[in-house]
Image: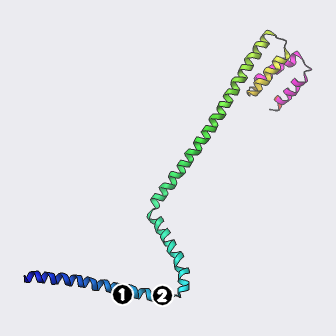
Amino acid sequence: MKKQNLKKSANKNKFYRKEVVFEAKKEVKKQVKEAKKKEFPSIYRFITEEPLQSLIVIKRFFVLNWKMITFSAVASFFIVLTALTIIDFKKNLEEYNKRAVKYEKLAGEISYWKSVVSKYKDYRDGYFRLALLEHQLNNDAQAQEYLNKALKLDPNFEEGRKFQELLNKD
């Protein structure tokens, strides 16, 4: 029984000691706060301490999370880069399809005019049309050949002379 009473009194003393220490810490904190209040007038405290506290919080955030921030920035960069690449690819594909359709149309016209010129060998306008179509396909050598045939058939062909000047400039 005496051992139990001793244990109880020891436990009470522990709790009492903890309360005393806790109260002492509270008192010290209170004294520190009062000392800080005496250092600066309260009107300036709000100006000097508030912005600094927010900067400290921001700095702490960046210091603690720099890996996550860096990873997020790099990931965002690659996501934007991928999106721009996809958009550019789509535009290029549309442009390619337009050019393919235009090329097919011009190739069809060229084959038609070649068949016309093979039937009517002295048809100046057929050769001129072939020269124009070949020029549109950037086949300037072939265009010059057809234009020479047209001008051979009609040396006074004014439109042919103008087109020949244009081909010679390029």
Q: Which residue is mark 2?
A: 37
Q: Quadrant of the N terminus?
A: bottom left
* Residue 135 forms part of the magenta stretch: no
What's the residue at 52%, 55% (across, down)? 73
Residue 118 lies in quadrant: top right
Residue 161 located left or right of residue 58: right
User: Which quadrant is home to the C terminus?
Assistant: top right
Identify the secondary structure beneath mark 1: helix
Name, please, the residue furthest toward the left.
Answer: 1
Residue 145 visible in the snapshot: no
Q: For residue 150: magenta?
A: yes
Label total for image: 2
| Percent coordinates x, y for residue 145 in the rendering | 79, 20
Residue 119 x %, y %: 79, 9
In-image side of 13 versus 79 (left or right): left
Instruction: Give percent across and percent down for residue 93.
Output: 62, 34
Does residue 164 appear left or right of residue 63 in this picture?
right
**CA gap, disc 2 and disc 1:** 15 Å
The amino acid type of the residue labelled 2 equals Lys
Seen as rendered, the residue at the extreme top is: 119
- Give the image's coloring scheme: rainbow
Query: What amino acid is labelled 1 in the image?
Result: Glu
- Callout 2: helix, strand or loop? helix
Residue drawn at point x = 85 percent, y = 27 percent: 163
Residue 109 in the image, given as x and y percentages of width and height: 74, 20
In-front residue for pair 8/150: 8
| Label 2: few (<14), some (14–19) or many (≥20) C-alpha neighbours in 10 Å | few
Observer-nearest of 11 and 150: 11
Instruction: Give the magenta part as a residue range.
Output: 141-166
**Image point (45%, 62%), residue name:** 65
- Residue tagged 1: 27
